Image (cartoon, grey):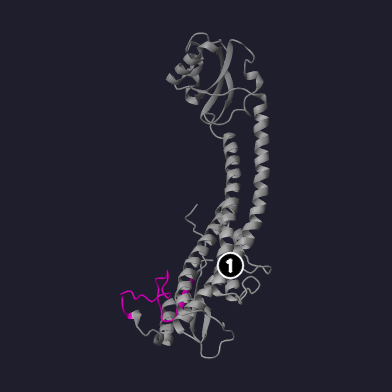
Amino acid sequence: MTEEYWIISVPGKSTPRQTYDDVGTLDSLVALSDDLARLDQYIEGVAKKLTQFFFHDILDDDRNRLAENLVLGPNGYDPIRYITEFQWDHAKYPTKQSLKNLSDIIAKATTHIENELKLRSQSYNSVKQNLETFEKKQIGSLLTRNLNDIVKKEHFVLGSEYLKTLLVCVPKAMVNDWYGKYETLCAMIVPRTSEIVAQDQDYCLFNVTLFQKTEDTFRHKCRENKFTVRDFTFDEKAFTNERDKIRELETERQKLYANLVRWLKINFGEIFSASIHIKVLRVFVESVLRYGLPVNFVAIIVHPTRKSTKRLRDVFDQLFGYLDQSDRSRYDEQIDIPGIFALQQEYYPYVYFKLDLDYIDMNKK
Protein backbone atom coordinates (compact mmCIF):
# COMPACT_ATOMS: atom_id res chain seq x y z
CA MET A 1 0.00 0.00 0.00
CA THR A 2 2.92 2.32 -0.63
CA GLU A 3 1.98 2.79 -4.26
CA GLU A 4 0.94 6.13 -5.74
CA TYR A 5 -1.97 6.39 -8.17
CA TRP A 6 -3.22 9.32 -10.24
CA ILE A 7 -6.83 10.18 -10.98
CA ILE A 8 -6.92 12.00 -14.31
CA SER A 9 -9.84 13.64 -16.10
CA VAL A 10 -9.65 14.93 -19.68
CA PRO A 11 -12.33 16.16 -22.12
CA GLY A 12 -14.30 13.43 -23.83
CA LYS A 13 -14.44 13.06 -27.59
CA SER A 14 -17.83 11.38 -27.66
CA THR A 15 -21.10 11.53 -25.78
CA PRO A 16 -20.52 10.21 -22.22
CA ARG A 17 -22.60 7.29 -21.05
CA GLN A 18 -24.13 9.20 -18.20
CA THR A 19 -24.71 12.88 -17.48
CA TYR A 20 -26.41 14.74 -14.70
CA ASP A 21 -29.58 16.63 -15.55
CA ASP A 22 -28.79 19.38 -13.11
CA VAL A 23 -25.24 20.31 -12.15
CA GLY A 24 -26.11 23.57 -10.47
CA THR A 25 -24.82 27.02 -11.19
CA LEU A 26 -21.16 27.83 -11.58
CA ASP A 27 -21.16 29.64 -8.23
CA SER A 28 -22.60 26.64 -6.41
CA LEU A 29 -20.07 24.33 -8.04
CA VAL A 30 -17.18 26.57 -7.01
CA ALA A 31 -18.42 26.54 -3.40
CA LEU A 32 -18.96 22.79 -3.55
CA SER A 33 -15.47 22.30 -4.95
CA ASP A 34 -13.94 23.98 -1.90
CA ASP A 35 -16.16 21.96 0.47
CA LEU A 36 -15.27 18.68 -1.24
CA ALA A 37 -11.55 19.46 -1.02
CA ARG A 38 -11.80 20.00 2.74
CA LEU A 39 -13.99 16.91 3.16
CA ASP A 40 -11.50 14.86 1.16
CA GLN A 41 -8.69 15.83 3.53
CA TYR A 42 -10.86 15.13 6.56
CA ILE A 43 -11.80 11.64 5.36
CA GLU A 44 -8.19 10.76 4.57
CA GLY A 45 -7.23 11.91 8.07
CA VAL A 46 -9.83 9.65 9.67
CA ALA A 47 -8.75 6.75 7.46
CA LYS A 48 -5.13 7.23 8.54
CA LYS A 49 -6.04 7.39 12.24
CA LEU A 50 -8.11 4.23 11.94
CA THR A 51 -5.42 2.34 10.04
CA GLN A 52 -2.60 3.43 12.33
CA PHE A 53 -4.58 2.41 15.42
CA PHE A 54 -5.37 -0.94 13.75
CA PHE A 55 -1.73 -1.48 12.76
CA HIS A 56 0.12 -0.29 15.86
CA ASP A 57 -2.25 -0.87 18.79
CA ILE A 58 -4.22 -3.91 17.64
CA LEU A 59 -2.01 -5.87 15.24
CA ASP A 60 1.36 -5.01 16.88
CA ASP A 61 2.94 -3.72 13.64
CA ASP A 62 2.26 -6.97 11.76
CA ARG A 63 1.99 -5.93 8.10
CA ASN A 64 0.85 -9.39 6.95
CA ARG A 65 -2.10 -9.40 9.34
CA LEU A 66 -2.91 -5.82 8.36
CA ALA A 67 -3.04 -6.77 4.67
CA GLU A 68 -5.41 -9.62 5.52
CA ASN A 69 -7.79 -7.25 7.31
CA LEU A 70 -7.72 -4.19 5.04
CA VAL A 71 -10.34 -5.44 2.62
CA LEU A 72 -13.55 -3.99 1.26
CA GLY A 73 -17.05 -5.31 0.80
CA PRO A 74 -18.46 -8.85 0.72
CA ASN A 75 -15.98 -9.84 -2.01
CA GLY A 76 -13.02 -8.94 0.19
CA TYR A 77 -11.31 -6.75 -2.40
CA ASP A 78 -7.99 -5.22 -1.42
CA PRO A 79 -7.78 -1.41 -1.78
CA ILE A 80 -5.87 -1.53 -5.07
CA ARG A 81 -8.39 -3.81 -6.73
CA TYR A 82 -11.21 -1.68 -5.34
CA ILE A 83 -9.96 1.50 -6.99
CA THR A 84 -8.91 -0.11 -10.27
CA GLU A 85 -12.31 -1.82 -10.61
CA PHE A 86 -14.27 1.01 -8.99
CA GLN A 87 -18.02 1.18 -9.46
CA TRP A 88 -20.28 3.81 -7.94
CA ASP A 89 -22.30 2.47 -4.98
CA HIS A 90 -25.81 3.47 -6.01
CA ALA A 91 -27.37 1.86 -2.93
CA LYS A 92 -25.43 4.05 -0.51
CA TYR A 93 -25.15 7.14 -2.67
CA PRO A 94 -28.14 7.43 -5.04
CA THR A 95 -27.20 9.57 -8.02
CA LYS A 96 -30.68 11.11 -7.99
CA GLN A 97 -29.50 13.03 -4.95
CA SER A 98 -27.81 16.40 -5.46
CA LEU A 99 -24.03 16.57 -5.27
CA LYS A 100 -24.32 18.53 -2.02
CA ASN A 101 -26.57 15.90 -0.46
CA LEU A 102 -24.19 13.13 -1.49
CA SER A 103 -21.26 14.92 0.13
CA ASP A 104 -23.33 15.49 3.29
CA ILE A 105 -24.19 11.77 3.47
CA ILE A 106 -20.51 10.84 3.24
CA ALA A 107 -19.48 13.52 5.75
CA LYS A 108 -22.06 12.34 8.30
CA ALA A 109 -20.97 8.71 7.97
CA THR A 110 -17.30 9.68 8.36
CA THR A 111 -17.99 11.72 11.50
CA HIS A 112 -19.84 8.75 13.01
CA ILE A 113 -16.88 6.45 12.31
CA GLU A 114 -14.42 8.97 13.80
CA ASN A 115 -16.47 9.34 17.00
CA GLU A 116 -16.91 5.58 17.32
CA LEU A 117 -13.18 5.03 16.77
CA LYS A 118 -12.37 7.48 19.55
CA LEU A 119 -14.70 5.78 22.04
CA ARG A 120 -13.64 2.23 21.16
CA SER A 121 -9.91 3.00 21.17
CA GLN A 122 -10.14 4.79 24.53
CA SER A 123 -12.03 1.88 26.06
CA TYR A 124 -9.57 -0.71 24.75
CA ASN A 125 -6.46 1.27 25.68
CA SER A 126 -7.78 1.89 29.19
CA VAL A 127 -8.20 -1.83 29.85
CA LYS A 128 -4.88 -2.62 28.17
CA GLN A 129 -3.00 -0.04 30.23
CA ASN A 130 -4.59 -1.23 33.50
CA LEU A 131 -3.61 -4.79 32.66
CA GLU A 132 -0.04 -3.76 31.84
CA THR A 133 0.19 -1.85 35.13
CA PHE A 134 -0.82 -4.93 37.13
CA GLU A 135 1.49 -7.19 35.12
CA LYS A 136 4.48 -4.87 35.52
CA LYS A 137 4.02 -5.04 39.28
CA GLN A 138 4.59 -8.78 39.13
CA ILE A 139 7.98 -8.50 37.43
CA GLY A 140 11.10 -6.39 37.66
CA SER A 141 13.50 -5.59 40.46
CA LEU A 142 12.82 -6.49 44.09
CA LEU A 143 13.27 -2.79 44.70
CA THR A 144 9.99 -1.94 42.91
CA ARG A 145 7.97 -5.05 42.10
CA ASN A 146 4.90 -6.32 43.90
CA LEU A 147 5.85 -8.68 46.72
CA ASN A 148 2.52 -10.38 47.39
CA ASP A 149 3.43 -13.44 45.32
CA ILE A 150 6.89 -13.73 46.92
CA VAL A 151 6.44 -13.44 50.67
CA LYS A 152 4.68 -15.96 52.90
CA LYS A 153 2.92 -15.77 56.23
CA GLU A 154 5.84 -17.38 58.06
CA HIS A 155 8.11 -14.51 57.07
CA PHE A 156 6.23 -12.15 59.41
CA VAL A 157 5.35 -11.66 63.05
CA LEU A 158 1.61 -10.99 62.83
CA GLY A 159 -0.95 -9.90 65.40
CA SER A 160 1.57 -8.47 67.84
CA GLU A 161 0.77 -5.27 69.70
CA TYR A 162 4.46 -4.30 69.95
CA LEU A 163 6.45 -6.08 67.25
CA LYS A 164 6.52 -5.46 63.49
CA THR A 165 8.30 -7.22 60.60
CA LEU A 166 9.77 -5.07 57.81
CA LEU A 167 11.15 -6.07 54.39
CA VAL A 168 14.49 -4.58 53.33
CA CYS A 169 16.14 -4.61 49.89
CA VAL A 170 19.92 -4.94 50.12
CA PRO A 171 22.28 -4.74 47.12
CA LYS A 172 23.96 -8.10 46.68
CA ALA A 173 27.38 -6.50 47.08
CA MET A 174 26.32 -5.29 50.56
CA VAL A 175 24.81 -8.49 51.97
CA ASN A 176 27.71 -8.98 54.40
CA ASP A 177 27.29 -5.36 55.55
CA TRP A 178 23.64 -6.09 56.29
CA TYR A 179 24.41 -9.14 58.36
CA GLY A 180 27.03 -7.23 60.28
CA LYS A 181 24.99 -4.08 60.91
CA TYR A 182 21.24 -4.73 61.00
CA GLU A 183 21.03 -5.68 64.70
CA THR A 184 22.83 -2.48 65.72
CA LEU A 185 21.25 0.03 63.34
CA CYS A 186 19.08 1.18 66.24
CA ALA A 187 17.75 -0.06 69.57
CA MET A 188 15.03 -2.66 70.05
CA ILE A 189 15.73 -4.84 67.01
CA VAL A 190 14.99 -8.51 67.65
CA PRO A 191 18.27 -10.41 67.18
CA ARG A 192 18.59 -13.16 64.58
CA THR A 193 15.24 -12.38 62.96
CA SER A 194 16.60 -11.52 59.50
CA GLU A 195 16.75 -14.04 56.67
CA ILE A 196 16.73 -13.92 52.88
CA VAL A 197 13.15 -14.05 51.62
CA ALA A 198 13.97 -13.70 47.89
CA GLN A 199 16.73 -12.52 45.58
CA ASP A 200 17.19 -11.39 42.01
CA GLN A 201 20.15 -10.36 39.89
CA ASP A 202 20.85 -7.19 41.88
CA TYR A 203 19.16 -7.40 45.28
CA CYS A 204 18.43 -9.66 48.21
CA LEU A 205 15.15 -9.18 50.10
CA PHE A 206 15.49 -9.61 53.89
CA ASN A 207 12.91 -9.61 56.64
CA VAL A 208 13.68 -8.16 60.07
CA THR A 209 11.55 -7.83 63.21
CA LEU A 210 11.70 -4.88 65.60
CA PHE A 211 9.58 -2.97 68.09
CA GLN A 212 7.08 -0.76 66.33
CA LYS A 213 8.05 2.44 68.15
CA THR A 214 11.57 2.30 66.70
CA GLU A 215 10.47 1.89 63.07
CA ASP A 216 11.12 5.51 62.00
CA THR A 217 14.65 5.45 63.41
CA PHE A 218 15.33 2.12 61.74
CA ARG A 219 14.14 3.42 58.34
CA HIS A 220 16.39 6.46 58.67
CA LYS A 221 19.45 4.35 59.55
CA CYS A 222 18.73 2.05 56.59
CA ARG A 223 18.74 5.01 54.20
CA GLU A 224 22.10 6.12 55.59
CA ASN A 225 23.52 2.68 54.90
CA LYS A 226 21.94 2.34 51.42
CA PHE A 227 19.44 -0.31 52.52
CA THR A 228 15.90 0.19 51.18
CA VAL A 229 12.90 -0.55 53.39
CA ARG A 230 9.94 -1.59 51.23
CA ASP A 231 6.52 -0.14 52.09
CA PHE A 232 4.59 -3.37 52.46
CA THR A 233 1.80 -4.76 54.61
CA PHE A 234 1.22 -8.50 54.52
CA ASP A 235 -2.26 -9.48 53.35
CA GLU A 236 -3.06 -13.12 52.65
CA LYS A 237 -5.90 -12.17 50.29
CA ALA A 238 -3.94 -9.54 48.34
CA PHE A 239 -2.15 -11.97 46.03
CA THR A 240 -5.36 -13.84 45.22
CA ASN A 241 -7.21 -10.57 44.59
CA GLU A 242 -4.50 -9.27 42.25
CA ARG A 243 -4.32 -12.55 40.35
CA ASP A 244 -8.10 -12.52 39.91
CA LYS A 245 -7.97 -8.89 38.77
CA ILE A 246 -5.36 -9.72 36.13
CA ARG A 247 -7.49 -12.59 34.83
CA GLU A 248 -10.55 -10.35 34.75
CA LEU A 249 -8.72 -7.61 32.83
CA GLU A 250 -7.21 -10.10 30.38
CA THR A 251 -10.64 -11.61 29.69
CA GLU A 252 -12.06 -8.14 29.10
CA ARG A 253 -9.13 -7.17 26.87
CA GLN A 254 -9.56 -10.28 24.71
CA LYS A 255 -13.28 -9.58 24.31
CA LEU A 256 -12.67 -5.95 23.34
CA TYR A 257 -9.85 -7.03 21.01
CA ALA A 258 -12.04 -9.45 19.07
CA ASN A 259 -14.83 -6.89 18.73
CA LEU A 260 -12.34 -4.19 17.68
CA VAL A 261 -10.80 -6.32 14.93
CA ARG A 262 -14.26 -6.94 13.45
CA TRP A 263 -15.26 -3.28 13.78
CA LEU A 264 -12.00 -1.94 12.33
CA LYS A 265 -12.12 -4.36 9.41
CA ILE A 266 -15.68 -3.34 8.51
CA ASN A 267 -15.14 0.38 9.01
CA PHE A 268 -11.86 0.52 7.14
CA GLY A 269 -13.89 -0.65 4.15
CA GLU A 270 -16.51 2.02 4.85
CA ILE A 271 -14.04 4.89 5.24
CA PHE A 272 -11.89 3.87 2.26
CA SER A 273 -14.96 3.57 0.06
CA ALA A 274 -16.15 7.00 1.25
CA SER A 275 -12.74 8.46 0.42
CA ILE A 276 -12.83 7.16 -3.15
CA HIS A 277 -16.44 8.30 -3.69
CA ILE A 278 -15.52 11.81 -2.55
CA LYS A 279 -12.64 11.85 -5.01
CA VAL A 280 -15.02 10.81 -7.77
CA LEU A 281 -17.31 13.71 -6.84
CA ARG A 282 -14.31 16.04 -6.91
CA VAL A 283 -13.33 14.78 -10.36
CA PHE A 284 -16.86 15.44 -11.61
CA VAL A 285 -17.11 18.95 -10.15
CA GLU A 286 -13.59 19.99 -11.20
CA SER A 287 -14.14 18.61 -14.71
CA VAL A 288 -17.33 20.64 -15.13
CA LEU A 289 -15.60 23.77 -13.84
CA ARG A 290 -12.59 23.17 -16.06
CA TYR A 291 -14.22 21.91 -19.28
CA GLY A 292 -17.69 23.45 -19.07
CA LEU A 293 -21.07 22.20 -20.22
CA PRO A 294 -22.43 19.93 -21.56
CA VAL A 295 -20.80 17.36 -19.29
CA ASN A 296 -18.29 15.44 -21.39
CA PHE A 297 -15.08 14.10 -19.89
CA VAL A 298 -13.21 10.85 -19.36
CA ALA A 299 -11.75 9.97 -15.94
CA ILE A 300 -9.12 7.26 -15.55
CA ILE A 301 -6.86 5.76 -12.90
CA VAL A 302 -3.16 5.83 -13.75
CA HIS A 303 -0.50 3.83 -11.92
CA PRO A 304 2.88 5.31 -12.84
CA THR A 305 6.12 3.61 -11.94
CA ARG A 306 8.80 5.76 -10.37
CA LYS A 307 10.93 5.65 -13.50
CA SER A 308 8.05 6.56 -15.80
CA THR A 309 6.59 9.49 -13.84
CA LYS A 310 8.38 12.30 -15.67
CA ARG A 311 7.92 10.70 -19.08
CA LEU A 312 4.22 10.21 -18.40
CA ARG A 313 3.83 13.86 -17.40
CA ASP A 314 5.50 14.92 -20.64
CA VAL A 315 3.15 12.76 -22.68
CA PHE A 316 0.09 14.20 -20.92
CA ASP A 317 1.40 17.73 -21.45
CA GLN A 318 1.83 17.04 -25.16
CA LEU A 319 -1.68 15.61 -25.45
CA PHE A 320 -3.56 18.09 -23.27
CA GLY A 321 -1.34 21.15 -22.98
CA TYR A 322 -3.74 23.01 -25.25
CA LEU A 323 -6.26 23.02 -22.39
CA ASP A 324 -4.11 25.47 -20.43
CA GLN A 325 -5.08 28.76 -22.06
CA SER A 326 -3.13 30.74 -19.46
CA ASP A 327 -0.02 28.63 -20.07
CA ARG A 328 0.29 28.64 -16.27
CA SER A 329 2.80 25.80 -16.24
CA ARG A 330 5.47 28.14 -17.65
CA TYR A 331 5.25 30.66 -14.83
CA ASP A 332 6.06 30.55 -11.15
CA GLU A 333 3.46 33.05 -9.94
CA GLN A 334 0.18 31.81 -8.49
CA ILE A 335 -2.99 32.23 -10.55
CA ASP A 336 -6.20 32.20 -8.54
CA ILE A 337 -8.81 30.15 -10.36
CA PRO A 338 -11.71 29.46 -7.94
CA GLY A 339 -12.46 25.83 -7.30
CA ILE A 340 -9.71 24.44 -9.46
CA PHE A 341 -6.80 24.83 -7.05
CA ALA A 342 -8.71 24.38 -3.78
CA LEU A 343 -6.33 22.90 -1.18
CA GLN A 344 -4.12 21.56 -3.95
CA GLN A 345 -0.65 22.85 -4.78
CA GLU A 346 0.00 20.97 -8.03
CA TYR A 347 -1.60 22.24 -11.22
CA TYR A 348 -1.76 20.59 -14.64
CA PRO A 349 -3.78 21.43 -17.77
CA TYR A 350 -6.01 18.44 -17.03
CA VAL A 351 -7.84 17.62 -13.79
CA TYR A 352 -5.48 15.72 -11.52
CA PHE A 353 -5.68 14.21 -8.04
CA LYS A 354 -3.01 12.12 -6.36
CA LEU A 355 -4.25 9.03 -4.55
CA ASP A 356 -1.76 7.96 -1.86
CA LEU A 357 -2.54 4.54 -0.40
CA ASP A 358 0.19 4.54 2.22
CA TYR A 359 -1.97 5.04 5.32
CA ILE A 360 0.71 3.74 7.69
CA ASP A 361 3.42 5.96 9.16
CA MET A 362 6.03 3.50 10.34
CA ASN A 363 7.84 6.17 12.37
CA LYS A 364 4.78 6.70 14.56
CA LYS A 365 4.53 4.35 17.49
Check the image and report above or below for 101 versus 260. below
Relative vertical location of residue 229 with respect to residue 296 in this rendering, above or below: above
For the point 62% across and 22% down, the residue is: 234
By secondary structure, the bulk of the magenta-drawn segment is best described as loop
Residue 89 placement, left or right of 324: right
Residue, far bottom:
14
Q: Which of 197 and 257 is in front in this view?
A: 257
Residue hosting label 1: 105
The answer to if 320 sits in the magenta stretch is no
Of the pair 221 and 104, the residue shown nearer to us: 104
Instruction: Please provide percent x and percent y for residue 271.
Output: 58, 64
Q: What stretch is highlighted in magenta?
A: 330-354
Say few, some or many: other residues with alpha carbon within 10 Å of mark 1 (under 14 / 14 to 19 / 20 or more): some
Up-down relation of residue 187 to residue 364 (above or below): above
Residue 202 locus on image (x, y percent): 51, 30
**Residue 62, position as x, y percentages in the image:** 58, 56
| Quarter where residue 349 is shown | bottom left
**Is residue 351 found inside the magenta-colored segment of the image?**
yes
At 65% from the left and 18% from the top, the residue drawn is 154
Residue 295 drawn at (x, y percent) = 52, 85
